[in-house]
Image (cartoon, rainbow, N blue to C red):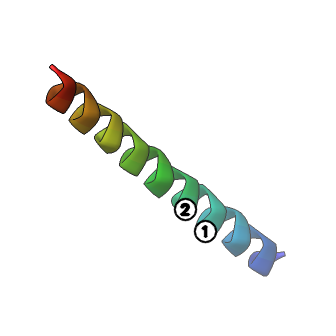
């Protein structure tokens, strides 16, 4: 049970990191296109 909870925590953390990177890339692309 604890291990499963840890997996969910790591997955959410990984998704959060990916979303943050994508947002930064989108912002950088919009700035460079203008």
Residue at 55 percent of width and 62 percent of height: 14
Q: Nearer the viewer, mark 1 or mark 2?
A: 2
Image quarter for residue 7? bottom right
Does 20 sit above or below residue 8? above
Q: Pick the residue in front: 27 or 11.
A: 27
Q: Are marks 1 and 2 in contact (CB under 8 Å)?
A: yes
Does 34 sit above or below residue 25? above
In the rendered structure, the answer to whether residue 15 lies left or right of residue 7 reads left
Q: As drawn, which residue projects farthest toward the front?
A: 33
Q: Residue 14: which disc?
A: 2
Packing grade of label 1 (10 A; few <14, some 14-19, many >=20) is few
Residue at 38 percent of width and 50 percent of height: 21
Q: Pick the residue in front: 10 or 5.
A: 10
Image quadrant containing the N terminus? bottom right
Residue for badge 1: 10
In the rendered structure, the answer to whether residue 34 lies left or right of residue 10 reads left
Q: Residue 33: which disc?
A: none
Image quadrant containing the C terminus? top left
Q: What element carries label 2?
A: helix
Residue at 45 percent of width and 56 percent of height: 17
Q: What element carries label 1?
A: helix
Does 11 sit above or below residue 1? above
Q: How far apart are marks 1 and 2 (CA)?
A: 6 Å
In the rendered structure, the answer to whether residue 3 lies left or right of residue 23 reads right
């Amino acid at each position: 049970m604890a291990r499963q909870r840890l997996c969910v925590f790591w997955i959410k953390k990984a998704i959060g990191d990916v979303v943050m990177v994508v947002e930064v890339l989108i912002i950088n692309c919009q700035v460079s296109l203008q």
